[in-house]
Amino acid sequence: MKDFNMKNDVLYENLVMAIREKYPERGKLTNMLADLLMIEKEAVYRRLRGDVPFTIFEIAAIANKLDISLDHIIGCSLKKSRPFQMKMVNFLHPREEDYRMLEHFLDGLRYLRDDPNSEVGDALNILPQSIVLGYRNIYRFYLFKWMYQCGDPVPVKYSEITPPDRLLMINHEIVMEVRQAANAYHIIDNMTFRYLVNDIKYFASIYLITDEEIELLKRELHKFLDDMEVLAARGCWEEGKNVHFFVSSINFETSYSYVETRNSHVTMLKSFTLNDATSCDEEIFQRMKKWLQSLIRTSTLISKSGEKDRIMFFEQQRKIVDTL
């Protein structure tokens, strides 16, 4: 019975911790729970202290409202189990719940700007999403590829991909918020541009992308490379926050990233081109960050002081793009 009570205590602590991660500010959290559960604030305080347990119906309502994975809550008490939650956002025909997931992620990024020690880091085999979201045609290609992989059995053409205005607005805000991190570390697979160019060539070979659209993508990829080279040479965003670029000597099976603020530690694994599997588990976060730090030691710096390697890298990527 003692062990059972201890397990229940751990699960309850995990639940309260997950709630506080979503709403770090106590006043807002109390008001939200009081409105959601239709109870007095004092009753909320008693539940958060553990004096009175949440009912199963209250837990379900909270999990639904805050997008908390109950699998994650249970898994946190298992030493060898670290669950991720797949964010199955429909990017081309998003519904309100899809927008809510994106806006919730955006809200988490807003804490980057007020934290002098905030960080974002990633190891990528696609172009950095926090940058590429600002390039309409390249982003449309990633949407097109996502639709080809996850959409209807009948493939759509690149020309048919039109991202909604609300999605583009959220993307713009994500780009601006990521730039507020005190430090950003981007480790790029040395084959990233080759992967992208090969994908474009393949879809052209099955007549889903026209020659004119290839030229459009080619011009924008050159613009992307020009802008990225300037950014890498400067070593910081226009806002003054540091950005570091590295080229990995090893290839990645997918893309990995983390966001670190004083309020939360989030780890993400990219799947299906654009979707993310996310985790707020501290052990996963620390392992991911340690792995990325080890990658940096075996990668080539191309930002700020790495001038010779930077020039060589961007010349090589332009030649790859020119094969389109």
Image (cartoon, helix red, strand yellow):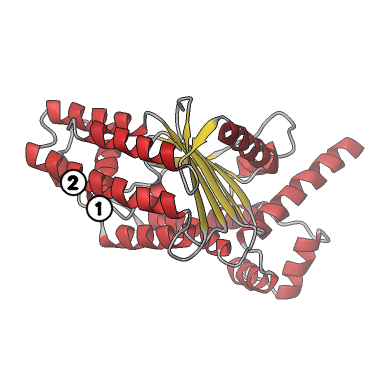
Identify the residue shown where x is 33% and y is 39%: 314
124 on left or right of 154: right
123 on left or right of 200: right
In this rendering, the count of numbered labels is: 2
Q: Which residue is mark 2?
A: 219
Q: Is residue 130 visible?
A: no
Position of residue 215 measured from the top left corner of the image (x, y, whole percent): 13, 41
* Tag of residue 58: none
Residue 29 image-quadrant placement:
bottom right
Rendered view: 231 above or below 289: below
User: Residue flagged by tag 1: what amino acid is it?
Assistant: Arg
Identify the residue shown where x is 36% and y is 53%: 230
Q: Which residue is mark 1?
A: 136
* Residue farthest front in this picture: 308
Q: Earlier in the sequence, mark 1 or mark 2?
A: 1
Given residues 285 and 247, the one toward you in this image is: 247
* Residue farthest right in this picture: 2
Residue 287 image-quadrant placement:
top right
Residue 20 image-quadrant placement:
bottom right
Label 1: few (<14), some (14–19) or many (≥20) C-alpha neighbours in 10 Å:
some
User: Residue flagged by tag 2: what amino acid is it?
Assistant: Arg
Q: Secondary structure under badge 2?
A: helix
Q: Secondary structure under badge 1?
A: helix
Position of residue 23 measured from the top left corner of the image (x, y, whole percent): 63, 63
Quadrant where the N terminus sits is top right
Estimate the spatial distance between the alpha carbons at disc 1 and disc 2, rounded to whole Å: 12 Å
